[in-house]
Image: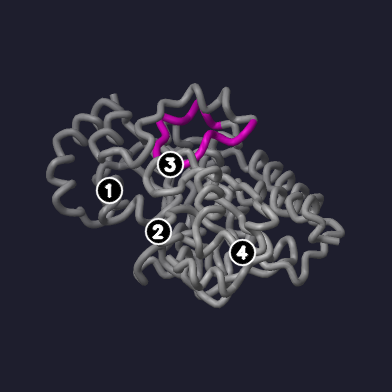
Amino acid sequence: MLRSARRTAALLLAPALLLTACGGSGPDGADAGRPAGPGYPRTIDNCGHKVTLTSAPKRALSLNQGTTEILLSLGLADRMAGTATWTDPVMKGLEKANATVERLADNAPSFEKSLDVEPDFVTASFVSTLGKGGVATREQFEKLGVDTYVSPSDCAAGRDTDSGGDGSRAKPLTLDVVYGEIRDLAHTFGVDERGEKLVARLKERVRKATEGLDASGVSLMYWFANSQSPYLAGCCGAPGAITRAVGAKNAFSDTHDEWPQINWETVADRDPDVIVLGDLTRKQQTAETARAKMRFLETNAATRNLTAVKKKRYILLSGQAMNPSIRTVEGVEQVAAGLRDAELAK
């Protein structure tokens, strides 16, 4: 009955909410008066919002692949109502669980489509997904009694999402922020022990990947997408965390923009030792796949004589590994292995 009531209210209110954001979640949401479940209510401080849950979510909607893969890794597929916004195939080992969850869209779904699966909890990796110009604002969902959560990596101290482009960071991102997100979501669903075990496994993977590694003096350049005006990693996002973990240096560590668009002549001046390529399956920008990127680099006059290109020093990463996510650990492993294979790391 509660879900049906929420859905009816959502369908009636959705057109108005799409035109203007409503303020605050208020006590009149659909969950008002619901008896608290065992161990609840529990409150999570998330990106300036205090999210208070009266019970563990049963129909979570994840609007980005990053949060989806955390929920799946926590064994919560049976509590998910849907997923959306994918850049890559699902992380290895999660294929079976992911197949049981409805994918609303490869990119961002509409607000109406999101409401249609009757979520009781909505997660997103980016403020832009749960904000103005995104699927909907947090307030729009919360007005309907739907709790929301945004990855803390996108609102961590020093993160500026209003600076244009993909934002900037005054302080370097650390993997501890990703581990904190895992703990938050595990706590939300009442599976804290699973969260601690997952964090421990990830930390051990980083330790094993970087043990005895010395890549000092090696410069890396991270190219996410776009051949005309390439998006290259600045100092302080997920690529920065990977670079610090392996002990190398980022060719563009002098910019705090998350993914600045930098011309190829500047790239040629920096002449990185290794180029880390985003191998994406989406079709939004030019040169999405690693193969397309390599073809461009090896035929373009400004890039074909780069040291990394001439020596074919490429390391391929998923898009998710190049964004703050559980896959960033995978990025550490792959970059460390690539440096060893190229005999650039001691």
Of the residues tagged 4 and 3, which is closer to the observer? 4
Mark 1 vs 3, N-terminal side:
3
Give the distance between the C-alpha atoms of the residues marked 1 and 2, in whole angstroms: 31 Å
Q: Residues within 10 Å of mark 3 (few under 14, many from 20)?
A: many
Mark 4 vs 1, N-terminal side:
1
Of the residues tagged 2 and 3, which is closer to the observer? 2
**Left or right: residue 79 compared with residue 178:** left
Which image quadrant: the C terminus?
Answer: bottom right
* 206, 267: nearer the viewer: 267
Circle 3: element type: loop
Q: Residues within 10 Å of mark 2 (few under 14, many from 20)?
A: few
Across and down, in percent, residue 190 comes to 56, 39
Question: What residue is at 62 percent from the left and 47 percent from the top?
Answer: 316
Mark 2 vs 4, N-terminal side:
2
Tell me, for residue 228, which label it has, or none.
Answer: 2
Circle 2: element type: loop
Mark 2–mark 3 CB contact (< 8 Å): no
Mark 4–mark 1 CB contact (< 8 Å): no
Across and down, in percent, residue 324 comes to 54, 54
In magenta segment, residue 90: yes
* 56, 319: nearer the viewer: 319
Amino acid at the residue labelled 2: Gln
Tell me, for residue 306, which label it has, or none.
Answer: 4
Across and down, in percent, residue 132 comes to 26, 56
Q: Residues within 10 Å of mark 4 (few under 14, many from 20)?
A: many
Reply above or below: 338 against 244: above
**Left or right: residue 12 compared with residue 160:** left
So how many labels did they put on this image? Answer: 4
Amino acid at the residue labelled 1: Ala
Q: Which residues are magenta?
A: 76-92
